[in-house]
Amino acid sequence: MPELADFLRMRYWYLAAAIWTALDQLTKWLAEASLSYGRPVEILPVLDFTLLYNPGAAFSFLSNAGGWQRWFFIVLSSVVSLALVILLPKQKHLLGRAAFCLVLAGALGNLIDRVRFGYVVDFIHFHWQGNYFPAFNLADSAISVGVCLLIIEWYLVERKQDKNA
């Protein structure tokens, strides 16, 4: 178990995660306050803001599962968030810390929605020539960027270890 000194050393990373989580919640609140459900508002020719609710996971996975998925995703997000809080101080590289920070923020942002509403609020909706990417939010963006950073870090660390071997 990490010591208090580890947590204090990482306080700015935890603060960054808290700020991103707050921005996520603020943008979701603004979306709900200013958009009508399911009615797109064009921002750019390839971007709409469309208020949607997702009771499932990524790409609406398990969205029609009958309600049990809410509790499953609440438990899963809670466990992942706790693990990230504990493991963040163990990250040796900047990329790893940034990645864990972003994934933590995203997990917390969507966890808050699931606890409050039973679904995740999505509103960012990209499309191209009649093809629509699933709607998402800032929490989803943080998770996606964080995972990409983890992959990049893993690749760079593996290459460095291969060179040193």
Image: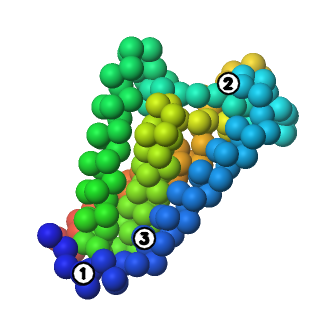
Q: Nearer the viewer, residue 130 or 111?
A: 111
Q: Is residue 103 left or right of residue 91?
A: right
Q: Amino acid at mark 1?
A: Leu
- Residue matched to label 2: 132
- Residue matched to label 1: 4
First-in-chain label (2 vs 1): 1
The quadrant of the picture occupied by the N terminus is: bottom left
Q: Residues within 10 Å of mark 3 (few under 14, many from 20)?
A: many
Task: Check if mark 2's residue and mark 1's residue have beta carbons within 8 Å.
Answer: no
Which residue is painted at 72% across and 25% down in the image?
37
Which residue is painted at 40% across and 78% down in the image?
11
Single out the residue that lies furthest toward the front.
116
Q: Is residue 123 left or right of residue 98?
A: right
Q: Quadrant of residue 5?
A: bottom left
Question: Marks 2 and 3, Cα distance to the nearest angstrom?
Answer: 34 Å
Residue 10, percent from left and from top: 37, 78
- Residue matched to label 3: 14
Question: Marks 2 and 1, Cα distance to the nearest angstrom?
Answer: 46 Å
Q: Nearer the viewer, residue 38 or 61?
A: 38
Question: Marks 3 and 1, Cα distance to the nearest angstrom?
Answer: 13 Å
Q: Is residue 29 left or right of residue 53?
A: right
Task: Check if mark 3's residue and mark 1's residue have beta carbons within 8 Å.
Answer: no
The mark closer to the camera, 2 or 3, is: 3
The quadrant of the picture occupied by the C terminus is: bottom left
Residue 105, percent from left and from top: 47, 57
